[in-house]
Amino acid sequence: MSERDVDARVEELTRGLRRMAAGLLEAAAEHPDAARARELSAAARVLTNDVLARLDGEAVEDSPAHRSEPEVQDTIPLAKNAASESGTALDELVELYLPNYARRLDDPVMTDPDLPYERESHLHRVRFGRGKPFEDAPLWNDDVPSRGKAVVRGMTSKAEVLRRLHHSYVIRRDLDSPEGELAVRVLQGCKAISRSRAIDDGEFVDESDLALKLEALQWRALVIAAGRGEYARAQLRTQLRQLEVLAASVLELDTAFRQRSSDPSLGVRIAGAVHGVKAVLRHWPPKVEEAVTESGHTML
């Protein structure tokens, strides 16, 4: 077999390994067992970062070449809390792309993305009017008899607007719970993914489609958290696992994309990472048809 034949065979096997890595990420996104999903996601990252990196001629961490080469200077500092060493991919993206001021919650935290414009405009006027009307807004689980009634501009008071548009928004007090903390992690993770350099500047994926998916996930997470309860916590943990699978593939692409100017050989790795992100997004997020409660029982 000639050298050209060998190179062609290696390239064919490499493409197969990239498809395998993407398949592992897809399986992780759809797997109902959290522990197994993490194992599949970790296997995909090892395959991409170690095996494929070697085949692409890149130095990996345990090789002498990696230890002797100069550190790649990135335009964005690495996570200050060492998320890359002990945290998750989602933690690292949040640390990289979400400054403290962007993590503060305003009232309302979010409004229903599908709310008709004429009703959304009423909330807009309340939000940017005088005072802090959302501090007295009903909680998600409150019984509000006037919910759904028409709002008449100039006739309906701000307090009554919030009552009639109840369940069209989520406020900070709705998230004052363990469920709320989980939902905020989903919220921040979605923002960090959308702000990452690879997504924002790379033009690798359809940003509008991704934005719609992330927006829908955020709203669902906030609504679930506002409803509270053990079942809500189980659903939110499932959402976080799904988001972590996407974050892992985006972080792989983002890291290579940010370092590309210092290492031109990263082009092949970027192409493989793009394939991985697209593979995950093809069926993401999976539908949550059941969730496992903290006690280990399945709730349908």
Image (cartoon, rainbow, N blue to C red):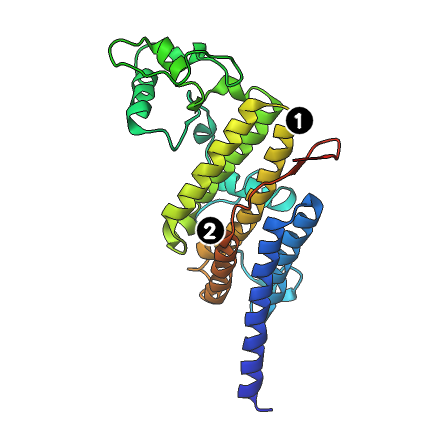
Mark 2 or 1 closer to N-term?
A: 2
Task: Please tell me in which quadrant of the rendered image residue 44 appears.
Answer: bottom right
Residue displayed at 30% across by 10% down: 156
**Quadrant assignment for the N terminus:** bottom right
In the rendered image, is residue 39 in sight?
yes
The image position of residue 32, as x and y in percent, is: 66, 46
Q: Which residue is mark 1?
A: 230
For this orientation, the residue located farthest to the left is 154
Task: Please tell me in which quadrant of the rendered image residue 67 appears.
Answer: bottom right
The image position of residue 277, as x and y in percent, is: 50, 55
The image position of residue 189, as x and y in percent, is: 51, 38
The kind of residue tagged 2 is Asp
Mark drawn on residue 139: none
Please tell me how crowded label 2 is: few (under 14), some (14-19), or many (20+) other residues with Cα within 10 Å.
few
Q: Is residue 27 above or below residue 152?
A: below
Task: Tell me the distance, in whole angstroms, between the alpha carbons under discs 2 and 1.
Answer: 42 Å
Q: Tell me if 292 is positioned left or right of 166 in this view.
A: right
The image position of residue 261, as x and y in percent, is: 42, 60
In the rendered image, is residue 97 in sight?
no
Q: Is residue 257 above or below residue 104?
A: below
**Quadrant assignment for the C terminus:** top right
For this orientation, the residue located farthest to the bottom is 1
Residue displayed at 28% across by 25% down: 118
Q: Which residue is mark 2?
A: 74
The kind of residue tagged 1 is Glu
